[in-house]
Amino acid sequence: QSIYRFRGASSANMVKFSEDYDEPVIDNLEINYRSSEQIVDSFVATAPRMGASHGMLPLSLYANNGPGPTATEIRRFEKPDDEIEGIAARIEDLKGSGITYRDQAVLCRTNKRLNEIAAGLEARGIPVLHLGSLFEREEIRDLLALLNLAIDPFGDAMVRVGALPRYALTLQDVYQIAKTIRDDQISTLESLAVLQADVVLSVAGRTGLAQLVEDLTDLKNTSTAWEFLASYLLDKTNHARDIATSMTISGQMKGVAIWQFLNFLRDEVPIKDGLPIERTLARIRQMVLLAEERDLRQVPDAALHMNAVRLMTVHGSKGLEFEAVHIPGLTVASFPSSNRGQRCPPPDGMVEGSEILSAKEFAKRAHATEEECLFFVAISRAQKYLNLYLPKKQPNGNNRSESQFLSWLPRHLVNQIDNPDQLSGPSITDDPNMINISWSDTWRMTESRLTAYERCPRRFFYTHVMGLGSARKMTAFSKTHDCIYDLMRWLKVERLSGAPSLTAAESEFDMIWQQRGPVGHAYATAYRQLASRFIRNLLAAGDGREFLEAKRLPVELSSGTVFVEPSEISRQQDGTVSVRRVRTGYCRSDEYSRLEYALYKLAAEAEFGADVLVEALHLTDNVSEPIPTTDRVISNRATSSVKMLDRIVAGQFPPDTDPISCPRCPHFFICAATPGGPLNQS
């Protein structure tokens, strides 16, 4: 049960059984009715190596089925794409031996790799039974984008809705529509009909927009999500009929996913604020962020009859069995997965059994134990054929070490196969994110934009190229910090003629607070007190300085110019010029390794010389200090900046998916669709 550590399960419950109950009767389950002798011997050999086995009875199993047709196979390939082709070849080979598609399963450690393998198998004509994360499936994202279009006043969802084959708007069409909606501040649903006359569109775009207007006529943003989509799918379009009559496994799986999604929409949403559709979308973000949508990833029983290869995570395979099991990604970077730490660790000593360890150390050990148990679960799902796969190299060509788990398998129980057969097919690695952009003469690359690209190129494209994402979800916390940044902009001007008093700064901030602050929030007083502390720290950090114009500072790189927008530029009493970055938060442990500080350093020295002082001010913990960067860090960051600029010019904007940041992204429901054609910003 240790694979359910995220739900609080622990093997310690079994170890303590004899302590919790007086004179327990203990017996062994010694006969395995599932797997062949070779497979049973393989996973029995791994049991003593597992942390969860400590204090437990030794695992002793007899294979009732006797010897199987082959030993466990470890199949090594050069690259991740080769691994997919190798899995496809082995699936077809086993099918030729009488093992049907439905009797085979691919078990992955992560959903991301599972999605890549599913696409690779389908591209080679192998049907797959795979839902994955329901809200991240393409056909579900299309429906989520329609819901988002209904309640978003900025029309951001047109990027995905417009890309649907039914409408086929170009990227330029969508850019013009979204820009007009944003500039005119008009409601999307109410304005689409007006836009047909006001926006310059392509011929196909005008036809597509007219079709969209017709489809959305009489649909209301005050409806529930279920009512809105049911009417769209059944009454307004032929979408539901087309899906229902599909003869392909992939088409039928789309129908299963939509059926699952519509059933989910029938449930009451616990969130109470906002329109019904808005509440549903907020709930979905919350579920994905907290991994509460796991049950929706399960293929319904009614679909299990399909003759298709089952694809699932190892977590989802618990309790299931298949004649042939394929487990990819047996490298140190994939299985076991990397320990990401805990965002909210318990206090030291709170968890029983962790007394001698810190919460961080205990969490690290618990993660390792869970990964070991997941490997045990994965290899024990197979009845006759167990195939383990790994690529020798990373996508960038660097070598990748094997998973430690492979060394747990006794050599005499394993067949080692290097570069086995592969099933070639259409490439799934061709970059679908190449976009031809004609940049506006007024568009500038700044340090904040370049750091945004570093975090996620696709989000950068939506936000800073297309201009989307204006409808940011505001909290009392974020409103308070935004008010402080407004005050900092006021200070930039006021300090040029002298040092404003605390009274003057508080008075100006009060006006900002009344306009933009969380004045009606239950804890508005506490947030206002926090803001006052920020203001005092901000003014105190400027004592004795002569402030100069905080103008943009260029960083000239071989691929282009990046402009740094400093928070402050000042001259200290000894004449030293200071360029300072001011943030409202804490100084993080990895703060000064980040790209923006290297760019600050390069820009400041280019403008004021090597004697310039480059500083950072963090208002929450009131830390003001010089930026401690080395020449090596600066050089590495400059090199990475050049590479990113090259990719931006080339139109490369791939999504960088992350289970924590993606659900919080304003573009979560539209990523990563892009209409076809070039984009002209002018």
Image (cartoon, grey):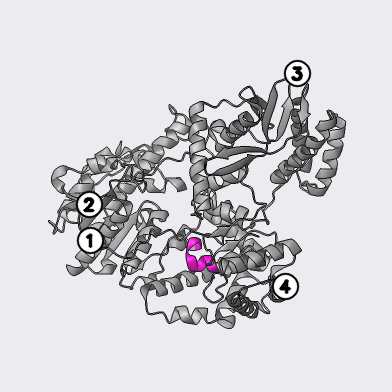
Q: Are marks 1 and 2 in contact (CB under 8 Å)?
A: yes
Q: Quadrant of residue 127?
A: bottom left
The Cα atoms of the two marked residues, 1 and 2, are separated by: 10 Å
- In the image, which is nearer the foreground, mark 2 or mark 3? 3
Position of 488 with respect to 91 (left or right) is right
Q: What secondary structure predominates along the stretch shown in magenta? A: helix
Split into 4 quadrants, where in the image is the C terminus?
bottom right
List x then y, in percent, for residue 639: 48, 38
* Bounds of the magenta segment: 135-142
Q: Amino acid at mark 1?
A: Arg
- Name the foreground residue: 354 vs 278: 278
For the point 35% across and 62% down, the residue is 427
- In the image, which is nearer the foreground, mark 4 or mark 1? 4
Q: Which residue is mark 1?
A: 90
Q: Which residue is mark 4?
A: 198
- Residue 277 in view, yes or no: no
Q: Amino acid at mark 2?
A: Arg
Q: Are marks 2 and 3 in contact (CB under 8 Å)?
A: no
Give the SS element for disc 4.
helix
Position of 185 with respect to 397 (left or right) is right
